[in-house]
Image: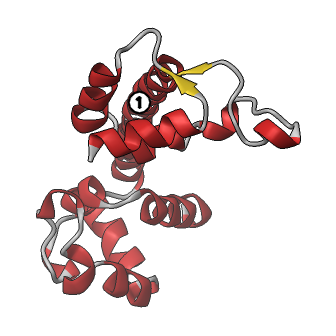
Amino acid sequence: MGKQYIEALKSRNVHFMVFSEYDAMQIMHYKFSYYTLIDYYPVFETYHARKKSGLFIDLDFAQLYYLANIDLQLRKMVMATCLDVEACLKSRLVFEIDSCCGGEFFFSQYYAKDRDYLDKVFSPEATDNMKNGRIKPIIEQISFYEFIKNAQFGTLERIAHAFYKDY
């Protein structure tokens, strides 16, 4: 199977000067799939002449591999940053709600206003895929803090909007 991928890469004029073909097969087997690597094709130049149309100009497998590695590292950094921002926003929102009117009071008021949306988002079907699977299927049974901890960004945005609008 790996040999087919090597041949497919070679047919597009991808060279193996930095990594051997064997190393490339190992990389495609254990680190990045062939399909992940070919997603980066549009970044690289191809010949436009009829005879070589669609073939890459001086593309080495290592360039695909290094680009995939850079992309993976950037995705990890962005994801970590997003999670940090989400945690900060949740903490700030909880602090402001607690300071103003108390979490449980606000949550009961908010739930009364936005019940249809919350019941849909936190239904047993929807919560099967909820973060950590820790949210209870019936929203009335959870505390404000448990709700905020497990709420996803779109729901947090709705809550923040309602809080800042009403208080």
Relative to 148, does residue 120 appear above or below in the rendering?
below
Q: Residue at x 42, y 52 (%)?
A: 100
* Residue 7 found in image quarter: top left
Q: Residue at x 39, y 53 (%)?
A: 97
Judging depth in this view, the residue of 104 and 118 nearest the camera is 118
Q: Position of residue 105 (x, y in %)?
A: 31, 68
Q: Residue at x 38, y 30 (%)?
A: 76
7 relative position to 57: left or right: left
Q: Pointer 1: what residue? A: 72
Colour scheme of the picture? secondary structure
30 relative position to 94: left or right: left
Number of other residues with Cα within 10 Å of mark 1, as a class: few under 14, some 14 to 19, many 20 or more: few
Q: Position of residue 101 (x, y in %)?
A: 37, 58
Considering the numbered disc 1 on the image, is that residue within a helix, a strand or a loop? Answer: helix
Q: Position of residue 156 (x, y in %)?
A: 44, 59
* Residue 141 found in image quarter: bottom left
Q: Amino acid at mark 1?
A: Leu
Q: Residue at x 75, y 33 (%)?
A: 46
* Residue 95 found in image quarter: top left
Q: Position of residue 19 (x, y in %)?
A: 38, 14
Relative to 38, does residue 164 appear above or below in the rendering?
below
Judging depth in this view, the residue of 142 and 165 nearest the camera is 142
